Amino acid sequence: MEIAVFQDTRGKTQSIVEPGIIKVYEGSKSTWKITKEIIFRIDNIAGIKEVRGNIINMAEELGNCKVFVGREIKGMTYNILDGMGFNTWELEGTPMELLEFVFEKELEEANIIKLSELENVKPIIQKVKDGHYYVNLKKIQKNNESLTSKSILIPFLTTTIFYQLEIICGHIPPWFHAEFEKLNLKMEATHISQSEIKVKVYPDICKE
């Protein structure tokens, strides 16, 4: 497993809005080695477009590493990393104090997703009529906090032919935009209350 840790000059995790160095660690359990180092800072950049470009370039430079650890990862950086498929962790300490914890938690999440796929999560996505489906993410995750929106939806979206999927959620997961674009899907979001959003998802070719 590869884990990127954003650090300050003392080797402790750093806030993403402050200058630091990203070190990519590869290994498992107690054996880790540094495979890449990237100097990164956005605190000295004024334009939002330039900041966004720097974050994207950094994420792409990390290659296959999709786990990112920092003391604070919020705002635009979080949204971009999440949209590009990263799991982000806000933790304070040194890499040697944190790598084992992150490694174990990542394995747990991977096992949950595998279990969900083995048990076929599609039945919790209800068929309303031919080609039309419905799922209440907010209710499902309230009853089972271990289920992520990705583990619920991705197996369905990648294996099912549908005309429309209606999703009820508390907020729009940041990964929606990137994944929907990959899958050639479009979405329309409507606030139905202060705490609920209805998202209609459909294949791009179905939109008239």
Image (tube, rainbow, N blue to C red):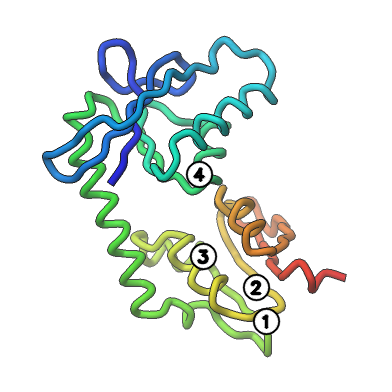
- The amino acid pointed to by label 3 is Leu
Between 6 and 28, the one lying in front of the other is 28
Residue at left offset 41%, top offset 27%: 72
**Looking at the image, which residue sits at the far left?**
30
Q: Determine which of the numbered discs, if any, sits on residue 165 in the image.
A: 2
Q: Which residue is mark 3?
A: 137
How far is mark 1 from mark 2, CA to CA? 6 Å
Asked whether the residues under the numbered discs 1 and 2 touch, taking CB atoms below 8 Å apart as contact, a structural biologist would say yes
Q: Which residue is mark 1?
A: 132
Return the disc, 4 or 1, that comes first in the chain's sequence.
Answer: 4
Q: Determine which of the numbered discs, if any, sits on residue 82 in the image.
A: 4
How far is mark 2 from mark 3, CA to CA? 12 Å
- Mark 4, other Cα within 10 Å: few <14 / some 14–19 / many ≥20: some
Q: Quadrant of residue 65?
A: top left
- Mark 1, other Cα within 10 Å: few <14 / some 14–19 / many ≥20: some
Return the disc, 1 or 2, that comes first in the chain's sequence.
Answer: 1
